[in-house]
Image: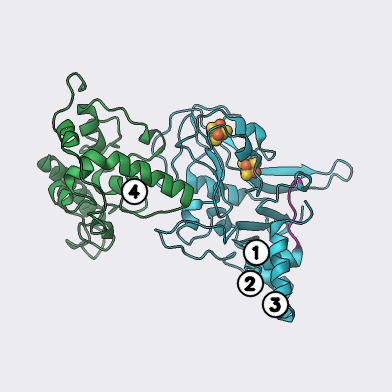
Amino acid sequence: MSQNRVDEYRRNFITALGGAAAVVAVAPTLLLREAHAAGEVAAKPADQAVTNAKRWGMLIDVTKLTDGGAGMVAACKKEHGWGDEAHSSPEQQAHWARVVKVTDKLTHNSFSLPVMCQHCENPPCVDVCPTGASMKRADGIVQVNKHTCIGCRYCMMACPYKARSFVHEALQDQKPHSPRGMGTVESCNMCVHRIDNGQLPACVEAAPDAVVFGDLNDPNSAVSQAMKTIGGKQIRADLELNTGVRYHGI
Amino acid sequence: MTSKFSTVFLASVLALAALLAGCSKAPSEADLNLATAKQKAEQCVEPENVIRTKHMDMLMHQRDATVIEGIRTKQHSLKECINCHVSATKEDGTPLHYGDKEHFCTTCHAAVGQKIDCFQCHADRPEVGQDPNYQHTVGSVEGHHFTQGVTAAAAPTAAEVQMVAQPQQGAAK
Ligand code: SF4
Ligand code: SF4
């Protein structure tokens, strides 16, 4: 695989527009800050299905995260109500997003970054699911359809990012917009209920200066422009999963 | 049933009134949701007999449309059923859950011996924390789904109506 689809789209667009594209790319460093509200989500009519015209993604600038992403993780917890499973051991607790600390063994330089489902374009978790419950939506969001999940946890094993967790106990008073229950696997769903409603994901809203969210297929979106300017690294890029969650400063 | 629901509503209205006592503006009729179960049945998303016999099919269809395709219309949304029909608390103020016999869904499911899995994952009561007046006012803008496409679903067959009217022997516990 030579180039990812995001790049392909961008290349085609630039070829098509020629010089005009250069004019669009204004003061690069401003972009991350300009996108203060951290990107954009166009509201979709409730009765229309999502299409592959868009592919949602985000760029997390780790250098601008003063707390290593703890605020983003807390926002996710609050939005979806995970992490307070009373009868689960720490290993069993749900973790839709985690703060991961990385230390260079040689220089002892260390930094933290938030890691959640990376919304792979070629998701291993979807490949292995025996029921089709682990699924990628047309707009690139990877999620578990808990209606058909049998809780085999194959996808947990397949995910290279440890993004998925299993609900070990009966739950009550879940968030009405985020159903979750015993015997099913769950992971970050990019706040799919918010995106469908034209809102940014909760974690993006919690760190507007460090995260840009938007349509990776649109070369003019804030996220595409920011990635064009400062780059967007994948964790374990060698796996060639073309992740929708990208990082700067790792 | 009507009177029981009115009591619940009265209780929640009283609680709301107590909450708002400190505020300068008393809630008007329009702010509160005073619809009785009967009024709600009249304005439900489908005619009562259709709902009785087909609600599971509608929910099943809607769940796939929502999760897989991102279609989030309110008309056949489980969340909206709950928002309209289920009170967040019992009359004594304690949380009302699906396991309680007063729960809207339980009242029938218990009678016909149905064990459903919906509420293992889905919230079985409205989230009051965000909006104390969570229930739609009948005929309000928020309740727009009451008037949309009411004729869309196929009417139940005579056999289905019969089944609902006469629960099978031994099913009820
Ligand atoms: S990060 Fe893991 S859970 Fe998310 S799409 Fe990739 S393989 Fe699946
Ligand atoms: S745990 Fe559920 S989503 Fe994961 S592979 Fe098994 S059936 Fe699929």
- Residue at mark 1: C-beta within 8 A of ligand 1: no
Q: Nearer the viewer, residue B139 or A46?
A: A46
Query: Would residue A205 appear left or right of B99 to someone viewing this image?
Result: right
Q: Is residue A213 above or below residue A174?
A: below
The chain letter for the residue carrying disc 3 is A
Residue A154 disc label:
none
- Identify the secondary structure beneath mark 3: helix
Colour cyan belongs to chain: A
Q: Nearer the viewer, mark 4 or mark 2?
A: 4
The chain letter for the residue carrying disc 1 is A
For disc 1, the marked residue is A223
Q: Amino acid at mark 1?
A: Val
**Which badge, 1 or 2, comes first in the chain's sequence?**
2
Query: Would residue A139 appear left or right of A31 to someone viewing this image?
Result: left
Give, as a single range, the part of the protein colored magenta: A231-236
Q: Is residue A88 above or below residue A134?
A: above
Disc 3 + disc 4, Cβ < 8 Å: no
- Identify the secondary structure beneath mark 1: helix
For disc 3, the marked residue is A17
The chain letter for the residue carrying disc 2 is A
Q: CA distance from mark 3 to mark 2?
A: 24 Å
Other-residue count near label 4 (Cα within 10 Å), few / some / many at <14 / 14–19 / ≥20: many
For disc 2, the marked residue is A34
